[in-house]
Image: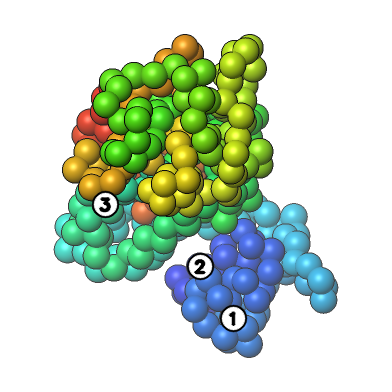
Amino acid sequence: MANKFDLADMQAFAAVAELQSFRAAAEAVHISQPAFSRRIDKLEEALGVRLLDRTTRRVTLTAVGRDFFRKTRQWLDDLDAMMLGMGDIAARRVGEVTIACVPSAVYYFLPQVVRRYHEKFPRIRVKVHDASANEVLVAVAQGEADFGLNFIGSQEAEIEFRPVLTERFVAACRRDHPLARRKKITWAELGQHDFMSVGRSSGNRLLMDLALANVPDRPQCQYEARHVTTLLGLVEAGLGVAAVPALAMPGKDHPTLISIALTDPVVTRKMGLIRRRGKSLTPAAQQLHDMLASNRAGRTASARAVRAG
């Protein structure tokens, strides 16, 4: 071949093949769009074939491009795996992993694992996309995040759900509240006080509504908030009591808030790692995914969540 291409050209091609946008792909590899276009032109010239069909609105792979992309993706993944497994080279590896996560799971799962991951791969940037359960699911399904931590997704055909813990819902109240000395209470008893909940668009609210559908004296909301953290702020301010996932509660040494086990019925949610079914993770993302799956701190949180109260 008269012209040669290099690793950067192949990485550029893989980016545009996945993102189907020159602008987004150029941003992903951190170069200007004109420089990115030159890389693709250089690659096509070197190969002597057209890999992409480009219009003003979209980018699609040609038949040859689809075949070349499969081979390129495999080659890049193999290269990543080799580099991640080679000591000093791993420490110099550059890249990015995005994990989508519901906020209540961030504190118990991510800090220790991300710290160990950073020690092993200091130049790989980890982005945490903390969002609602529905937003986390969409981010993973659409490829905006490599994988996620969520309590919904097990029923989605395109999502692989790997359970990591089961936690129960608990009552949140102030330490000076009449319920604070109780070790457990029923949902009906909770409903005798000013009750607050997340809104109907929340995944947590859906779980509670389904579990309490046949409970005659279920609590009726006096106040609603969009996020559990906001709800806890309202409880702390003395506006009432709330039902929240155990992992959302602060530690036992919190000066104002306390959690109480809820019964009749016991309502639980299952937290798990989610990823797109049939879609391989990059080696860098796979490393972080596996570290989270085997995390001892997560298992400790699991036991604490089930015993909450």
Residue 295 coordinates in the image, percent (x, y): 25, 37
Q: Which residue is mark 1?
A: 36
- Tell me which numbered mark, 2 or 1, is placed earlier along the sequence: 2
At label 1, which amino acid type do we have?
Phe
Label ID, residue 111: 3
Q: Nearer the viewer, residue 94 or 196?
A: 196
Q: Locate residue 106 relative to residue 160 in the image: left or right.
A: left
Q: How is the image coloured?
A: rainbow
Q: Does the rendering let one see residue 188?
A: yes
Crowding at mark 1 (Cα within 10 Å: few <14, some 14-19, many 20+): many
Crowding at mark 3 (Cα within 10 Å: few <14, some 14-19, many 20+): few
Q: Locate residue 305 relative to residue 269 in the image: left or right.
A: left
Alpha carbon separation for disc pair 2 and 3: 30 Å
In the depicted structure, whether residue 58 falls above or below residue 218: below
Residue drawn at (78%, 67%) of the image: 58
At label 3, which amino acid type do we have?
Pro
Residue 19 position by quadrant: bottom right
Q: Locate residue 33 relative to residue 109 in the image: left or right.
A: right
Q: Nearer the viewer, residue 236 or 162?
A: 236
Residue drawn at (35%, 28%) of the image: 179
Residue drawn at (60%, 35%) of the image: 221
Q: Locate residue 31 relative to residue 115 in the image: left or right.
A: right
At label 2, which amino acid type do we have?
Gln
Q: Are marks 2 and 1 in contact (CB under 8 Å)?
A: no
Q: Which residue is mark 2?
A: 11
Residue drawn at (57%, 86%) of the image: 32
Residue 180 coordinates in the image, percent (x, y): 30, 30
Q: Nearer the viewer, mark 2 or mark 3?
A: 3
Residue 52 coordinates in the image, percent (x, y): 72, 67
Label ID, residue 252: none
